[in-house]
Structure formats: structure tokens, C-alpha cells
């Protein structure tokens, strides 16, 4: 006898598909069924069945191979335009990643943000997620920021370095749909096996996206040039320890003084100035996305008589 899906499983898979679509709709970004399968807890066959049913009920919309909860056909052309821009910009991002990897104590360089999803809007920057050697995160960060300020005239268009982690503390503290999505879309550009360690320390993302366990991503090995080797030698001892502690202290004080408008709870999410992690997100994008998603869920539930749970 053929096994039939229980109502609970069918309801859960439907909720999962809708919530995923609503999440990407906060970015006005329609996605394919293959992308849905990557961001889902359910099998591809179940997802296609759910999509067919939801389209029939006119709860979601399809245009070409893309799906969305927003009835706006222009979103597909917007996505394709952004995909093309990201593709054209990728080579520049690759070269910049290789350049960043030659700064002292850099152990891993990853593309994050919009470009890691294969999309670049008109005003989007190229974001980099950087892993450093232990006890040298702040020294490395300061050197990169100084380079941006002096040689790029503080432009972050192709050089947005706003998230650093130390290789001996690789677990991401905030665990939610936003951080999980950002994590599974990271593109490793440089690093001698550090990506595997990053995955091992963040297995919690599988609670959101089980399909991620099947993904294998490789990066270029970092070959240290003479300048990097020399700088690491100079800053390997007590001088490096002092400068690392000093630059962390200065940055933390600057953030606390400049962004006093933030509530303490929000500040702790948007900014981190700790020994093994640096995060500088003045736009507090994480909170905005989760809040926007929950508003969309509530509106969707009210309009279509669903009971999709809010995101925590």
C-alpha cells in the first residue's frame, strides 16, 4: 500500500515553503523550486506538491521558474538583472578576496551578504566575512580598515569588511533564520581548510537547513607573501598582543559613543567588540529582516487564514 502524508506533515511542509518564500520576499527576491529545496526541511517532491497546491489556491505566484507571495512580475526581471551584475562583479570580488588574504593573520576570507546569494542591487556593497588567527583579530581588522580609509577613501563599495571571527572561537552566537541563511550562503574564497572547521562549529544551522550537510565548498589555499610573513613576525609577540588589545578597546569605545541611540538589546546584536569576534552593522539588518518577516507572516495569516508560527 502507498503511504499517504499525514495532515500534520502536509501542514508543516506548507508552512515551511510559505515562510521561506516570505523570507526572501522581504528582499523582493523570488526563488526557484531548487532553491526552496535547499532552504527547506522537506523533500523536493513534497515541495513541488505544496507549490502546485498553493498556486492553485492563488496563495502564491509563479513566473517562469520563480516563486513568490508577491503578485508582481517585475520582481523576476529585477532578480535577473541583479544576478547578472553579481556574475560580472564576481571576478573583482575574487581578486579583492585574494588581496585581503595577504593581510597578516588572515586565515579565511568569505563572500557574504547579497553577492553570496548571487545578487547585487544598485546600492549593494561586496561584503566579506573574515577569520583571523587567535589574539590578532583586532590588529588585522585595524589594518584592513586603515587600508580602506587611506587607499579607498573610505569607500566600502567593493570592500565592506564588517564581520570578523577568530579561528579559535568559530561558533556564531545568534542562531536564527537570518544568521542561518547568511551562514549557508557563505562563499569561501581563501583559507586552508578553515571552512570545514567553521561548519563543524555551527552544526545548528542544520536545524533550519538540513540540505546544507550535503554541500561541499572549496577555497583557494593562502600562500603567504614576503610582506605578510614579515608583518606577522613583527607583530607575533608582545607588541602584537598590546596593539590587539588597544585597538579593540578603542573600537569598542567608539561604537558605544557613536551609537548611543540603540537600545542595549539591539546594540548587542548590531555590534560586537569582543576578543574573538568583531561585528559592525549600524543598520542592524538582522533585526530589521526578522521584524519584517514576522509582519509579513502575520499579514499572510490574516489574509489567507493560515497559522504559520512567527520567527524567533
Image (cartoon, helix red, strand yellow):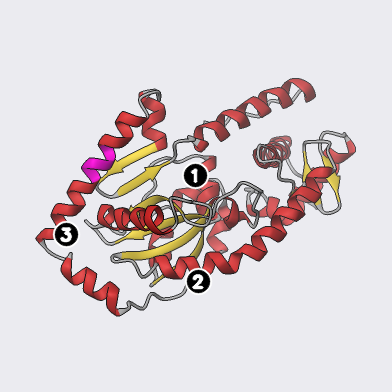
Outermost top residue: 302
- Residue at (70% x, 57% y) in the render: 83
Residue underneath mark 1 = 179
**Label 1 crowd (10 A; few <14 / some 14-19 / many >=20):** some
**Does the rendering let one see residue 182?**
yes
- Residue at (74% x, 20% y) in the render: 302
Judge by depth and name the residue closer to the eye, 251 or 205: 251
First in residue order: circle 3 vs circle 2: 2
Q: In the picture provided, is 302 more to the left or to the right than 148?
A: right
Q: In the picture provided, is 62 more to the left or to the right than 130?
A: right
Residue 209: image x %, image y %?
Answer: 57, 50
Q: CA distance from mark 1 to mark 2?
A: 21 Å
Does the magenta-highlighted stretch encompass residue 237? no
First in residue order: circle 1 vs circle 3: 1
Judge by depth and name the residue closer to the eye, 277 or 251: 251
Residue underneath mark 2 = 218
Residue 237 drawn above or below residue 286: below
Task: Count the labels in the image.
Answer: 3
- Bounds of the magenta segment: 248-252
- Element under label 1? helix
- Element under label 3? helix
Residue 249: image x %, image y %?
Answer: 21, 41
Q: Quadrant for residue 272, please give it.
A: top left
**Label 3 crowd (10 A; few <14 / some 14-19 / many >=20):** some
Q: In the picture provided, is 286 more to the left or to the right than 273?
A: right
Per the rendering, the mark at residue 240 is 3
Q: Quadrant for residue 307, please give it.
A: top right
Outermost left residue: 238
- Residue at (38% x, 66% y) in the render: 194
Q: In the picture provided, is 299 more to the left or to the right than 114?
A: right
Residue 33: image x %, image y %?
Answer: 75, 53
Amino acid at each position: 500500500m502507498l503511504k499517504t502524508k499525514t495532515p500534520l506533515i502536509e501542514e508543516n511542509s506548507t508552512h515551511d515553503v510559505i515562510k521561506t518564500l516570505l523570507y526572501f520576499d522581504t528582499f523582493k527576491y523570488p526563488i526557484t523550486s531548487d532553491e526552496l529545496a535547499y532552504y527547506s526541511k522537506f523533500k523536493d517532491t513534497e515541495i513541488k506538491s505544496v507549490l502546485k497546491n498553493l498556486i492553485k489556491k492563488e496563495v502564491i505566484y509563479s513566473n517562469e521558474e520563480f516563486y513568490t507571495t508577491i503578485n508582481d512580475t517585475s520582481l523576476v526581471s529585477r532578480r535577473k538583472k541583479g544576478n547578472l551584475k553579481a556574475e560580472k562583479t564576481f571576478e573583482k570580488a575574487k581578486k579583492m578576496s585574494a588581496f585581503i588574504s595577504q593581510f597578516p593573520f588572515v586565515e579565511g576570507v568569505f563572500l557574504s551578504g547579497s553577492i553570496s546569494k548571487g545578487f547585487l542591487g544598485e546600492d549593494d556593497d561586496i561584503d566579506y566575512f573574515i577569520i583571523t588567527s587567535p589574539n590578532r583579530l583586532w590588529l588585522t581588522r585595524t589594518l584592513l580598515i586603515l587600508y580602506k580609509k587611506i587607499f579607498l577613501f573610505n569607500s566600502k563599495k567593493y570592500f565592506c569588511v564588517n564581520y570578523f571571527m577568530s579561528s579559535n572561537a568559530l561558533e556564531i552566537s545568534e542562531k536564527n533564520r537570518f544568521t542561518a541563511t547568511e551562514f549557508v550562503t557563505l562563499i569561501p574564497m581563501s583559507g586552508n581548510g578553515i571552512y570545514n572547521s567553521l561548519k563543524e562549529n555551527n552544526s545548528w544551522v542544520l536545524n533550519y537547513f538540513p540540505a546544507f550537510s550535503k554541500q561541499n565548498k572549496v577555497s583557494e589555499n593562502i600562500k603567504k607573501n614576503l610582506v605578510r610573513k614579515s608583518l606577522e613576525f613583527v607583530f607575533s609577540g608582545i607588541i602584537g598582543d598590546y596593539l590587539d588589545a588597544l585597538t579593540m578597546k578603542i573600537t569598542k569605545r567608539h561604537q558605544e559613543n557613536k551609537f548611543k541611540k540603540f537600545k542595549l538589546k539591539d546594540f548587542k546584536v548590531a555590534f560586537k567588540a569582543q576578543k574573538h569576534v568583531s561585528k559592525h552593522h549600524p543598520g542592524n539588518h538582522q533585526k530589521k529582516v526578522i521584524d519584517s518577516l514576522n509582519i509579513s507572516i502575520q499579514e499572510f495569516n490574516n489574509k489567507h487564514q493560515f497559522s504559520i508560527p512567527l520567527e524567533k
